[in-house]
Image (spheres, rainbow, N blue to C red):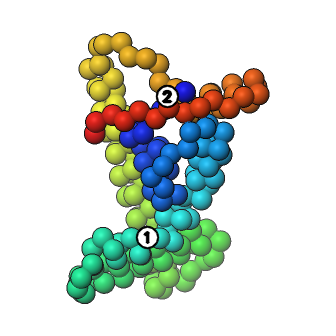
Amino acid sequence: MNLNRNSNLSKIYRWFYNEWRMPSNLCPYFWKLVLMFVLILPSAILSLPHTAYQKFDRDSHNPIFGLFGWGVLWIVFCVLVAISSLFIHYDKHSFMLYSSVTGWITMMLLSLTGLVLSIIHLIEKYIEKRAQNHCEEEPSNIISEFIKAKRNKYCPQITWKDEPK
């Protein structure tokens, strides 16, 4: 089975497990991918403050970064209050009601932004695929290869190929 070492999936795998070496066997690689997809969101959320601190504030303290951090925490609070407003009734003209409205607006804007970015990404992929007129070998699908391997009771070796970025 041939897989691309520079694919997004393998880059995320290397980031998540903090490994540069890629496994040479599909079975452990597949199960580590499954575990990664289950744990990646909690892991990313928990490591976000440290990652942001390392990325933006290496040598000196920047008050703008702290203000941005508090703003993000307030937005997260508003989103949580908005979700809780499904179960709790807040008084009219209260801080919690205004926070709930802010949270709903934020969630709608984030959803709309995600939808627009997804559509743009799909259009880019479609244009890129149409631009490729030459024949290429059929890319391997990890899930179908894993199912075939389990059905035939074998575990295929993975050959990693590097493509220029």
Choose the circle earlier in sequence order: 2 or 1: 2
As helix, strand or loop, the secondary structure at mark 2 comes to strand
Q: Residue 99, how many percent across, how many down?
A: 45, 78
Pointer 2: what residue?
2
Quadrant showing the C terminus: top left
Looking at the rendered structure, the kind of residue marked 1 is Leu
**Which image quadrant for residue 60?**
bottom left
Asked whether residue 140 appears in the rendered view, the answer is yes
Residue positioned 50% across, 45% down in the render: 22
**Which mark lies nearer to you, 2 or 1?**
2
Looking at the rendered structure, the kind of residue marked 2 is Asn
Q: Residue 144, how many percent across, how many down?
A: 62, 27
Q: Residues within 10 Å of mark 1 (few under 14, many from 20)?
A: few
Residue positioned 45% across, 56% down in the render: 15
Compared across the picture, whether 115 is left or right of 149 comes to: left
Residue positioned 34% across, 77% down in the render: 53
Q: Residue 30, how many percent across, how many down?
A: 62, 41
Q: In the rendering, which numbered label is found on residue 102?
A: none
Residue positioned 48% across, 49% down in the render: 21
Pointer 1: what residue?
48
Distance (Cα) linking label 2 and label 1: 33 Å
Q: Eyeballing the image, is 118 above or below 75?
A: above
